[in-house]
Image: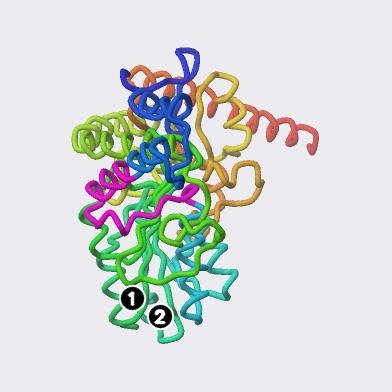
Amino acid sequence: MSGAHSPGPELTYLDHAASTPMRREAIDAMLPFLDVQFANPSGSHRFARQARTAVDDAREVVAGVLGCDPGEVVFTGGGTESDNTAVLGVVAVRGGTAVCPATEHHAVLHAVERVGGRIVRVDRSGRVDTEHLAATVDADVSVVSVMAVNNEVGTVTDVAAVADVARRAHPGVVVHTDAVQAASWLDLRELTPHVDLLSLSAHKFGGPKGVGVLVARAGVRFEPLLIGGGQERERRSGTHHVAGIVALAEALRLADAERDAERVRLTAMRDRLVDGLAARLDGVLETVPRDHKVAGSAHVCFEGVENEALLFLLDEAGVCASAASACAAGAMEPSHVLAAMGVERRWGAGALRLTLGRTTTEADVDRAVDVIVAAVRRLRGRRDAGRHDAGTVAS
């Protein structure tokens, strides 16, 4: 598709939840700040003021998409930093502990564990058990963190409802949402009013890696992770990544403008993908009902298949997919998300995360179906042949 770099005709890229190809417009926006406009925006001369103006303009754009005040936008180094800051920074100021659902990204989950936090159950679709949340949050809890969209299975959380439950249990609690996977699918203006802190990462919606946002609503205090230069109103020190910030704003602006149309297009594409697999293979489980998840998520499980072997065959055939979060790839451990949802081991072992985005075409989907079907049949054939050989030897 126009307006973005694609991985090339030899690859079918269905791993947009891990990272999206940069938009051409975002690249064009950042190039001057990698070349002729290289000044440090913290300086006092006119060249520095030009860089500072670019950062300020980007902040205005981001605030407009998020429906917040520009002064509430803090530029960070990415989603992990934003999530860590939200959890650890609030606890450092307020004391107490933190709470999150069991299906959170490890950037939140490990931060909550570090402060001796509490974990809340989810249902079979990955939605927060609000009764358990209400019973878990008390006056000792300083922050509750919940994902807007799950990075692995695509489940959408009713953040407003979760925030309401948490605040009724403890009126003073700070509510944070990891919205890293949400910008392409949800209108963030409808999300921001319900939370005190919100995290974004540019490379999830067509921007560059290494730059993100933490929205901190007025009056919310937290201890910054990075100190020294006093940038971002003492909330995140370090020289601004001007090129990345400018590109983030442009990518976010375009994602916001195109969201509704892309959601319709990719819903049809996602359905074509999952339905195509189910029509040609037995033992296929769609992990989360479609009305509970975003359009770009096609998480499925194949009975009788190990996903490590499946991903190897897909990679050989040029289909880019994953089994879980890219941050956990290669960890050789069961998915904590599927375990929390109660997915049986026989299904979870064959889990495949297929995520679609702006560059996905019908040809990509149809080719992926052909390749996945062939790979699953090949692996099941090996399994069945192995069982047959074992039975012959045993007899």
Give the SS element for disc 1: helix
Where residue 147 appears, x then y in whole percent? Answer: 39, 57
Specify few, some or many for label 1: CA neighbours under 10 Å numbering under 14, 14-19, or 20 or more.
many
Residue at position x 32%, y 53% from top?
Answer: 156
Identify which amino acid the numbered label 2 is placed on: Val
Q: Could you tell me if residue 152 is visible in this image? A: no
- Residue at mark 1: 166
Residue at position x 39%, y 76% from top?
Answer: 132
**Does the magenta-highlighted stretch encompass residue 59?**
yes
Where, by quadrant of the figure, is residue 100 drawn?
A: bottom left
Asked if labels 1 and 2 touch by Cβ distance under 8 angstroms, the answer is yes
Horizontally, residue 134 falls left or right of residue 203, namely left
Residue at position x 33%, y 76% from top?
Answer: 166
Q: Is the magenta stretch mostly helix, strand or loop?
A: helix
Q: Could you tell me if residue 93 is visible in this image? A: yes
* Depicted 242 relative to depicted 221: above or below: above
- Residue at mark 2: 137
Horizontally, residue 33 falls left or right of residue 325, namely left
Where residue 301 appears, x then y in whole percent? Answer: 47, 42
The magenta-colored residue range is 56-79
Q: In which quarter of the image is the N terminus?
A: top left
